[in-house]
Structure formats: C-alpha cells, structure tokens
Image (cartoon, rainbow, N blue to C red):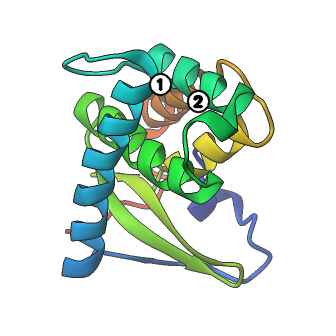
Amino acid sequence: MGLLAFISGCFGGNKPEISQLDEIESKFLTENFKLGYRLLVKVLGEQEKFELLEIDRAVSIIRDDFTGYGYTHDQVIEQIGTYLGEVIKSELPVQWFTYTDKRGKDYILVHEEIAVFTFPYSAIYKALIEGRNGALEEVFNSFKEQIDEHIDSAEVERVSS
C-alpha cells in the first residue's frame, strides 16, 4: 500500500534510495507489462484492457489453482504487478522508479509532484500469497486518497524535476 515515507519517518533512520529507471529497468517493465497482459488473457480471456477488479479476480483464480498456469510466484508478481502499475499510471499522474533499502530493490510508482508512492508488486504479493481478495482496488483508492489529501500540503516533500 502507498506510504508517506518522507513524512512518517517509518524507516528508523535508514532512508531508502529512490532512483529513476535506467534503460535495462525500463525494458524490464515494458516486457513484464506485455507478459502480464498475456497472463491475464490466459486466465480471463481476451480483453482490450483489464481493470482493477478483473486483475484481482485473475490473481485469485491463479492462487486457487496455481499449478495449472505454469508460472512461478515471482513471475506472477512481476508480470501482473507491472500490469497493475500501468493501470494505476493510466489513472494517476505517477511514474515508475526503483526503491532500494536494506532489504533489497523494488519498483514503485511515485506521484509526479509530491513524495507519495505505492508498491504494485507488493500489492500483487499480498493478493497472491496472503490471499487478500479485493486488495487491489483498496490499494488504488488508498493511494489516490493520499495524493488528494496531501497534494496541497506544505509538509509533504515535493518531487524535484
């Protein structure tokens, strides 16, 4: 779920590094978006675009019959996580970045103006591994609320161009 990490100080002094994507990372996300779409088509059938509730339903179907699809958990998380991120990106003014902390590296979406971000891969992980049905729409709505609540706040760090 989106975090207001720059305000909350929830990292205990270990501030994460947020970086722009390099060419390899951009290609990785582009390819995973295509693979995510193909996986969603395999599970739900052909559609032009999959919305949040459909993505959530597909993850639930995969979770309930994981062996029938021939994907590892990591592949599902990366592919559908990237697709989810692109759906969010099509609805909100956000961009992909990398997030690195002491636990490793992840891909995040950061609002274009304020330091508010969300973790699409983590959302898919929670839906797939932890069985959180309906979580994706909640993630989106929570992220949008954080943006709406803090867009005009002087207390929220601005994203530098």
Q: Nearer the viewer, residue 148 or 68?
A: 68
Q: Residue at x 42, y 71 (%)?
A: 98
Q: Secondary structure at mark 1?
A: helix
Q: Which mark is residue 132?
A: none
Q: Position of 43 compared to 126: left or right?
A: left
Q: Residue at x 47, y 46 (%)?
A: 81
The image quadrant where one finds the C terminus is bottom left
Q: Residue at x 25, y 40 (%)?
A: 93
Please tell me how crowded label 1 is: few (under 14), some (14-19), or many (20+) other residues with Cα within 10 Å.
many
Please tell me how crowded label 2 is: few (under 14), some (14-19), or many (20+) other residues with Cα within 10 Å.
many
Mark 2 sits on what residue? 59
Q: Nearer the viewer, residue 90 or 158?
A: 90
Residue 137, image x and y in percent?
54, 21
Q: Residue at x 53, y 47 (%)?
A: 76
Residue 28 in view in this figure: yes
Q: Nearer the viewer, residue 80 or 148?
A: 80
The image quadrant where one finds the N terminus is top right
- Badges 1 and 2: C-beta atoms under 8 Å apart? yes
Q: Position of 147 compared to 15: left or right?
A: left
Image height of 43 relative to 14, above or below: above
Residue 64, image x and y in percent?
73, 26
Residue 128, image x and y in percent?
69, 38
Mark 1 sits on what residue? 55
Give the quadrant of residue 104. bottom right
Q: CA distance from mark 1 to mark 2?
A: 6 Å
Q: Secondary structure at mark 2?
A: helix
Residue 1 in view in this figure: no
What amino acid type is highlighted by mark number 2? Answer: Val
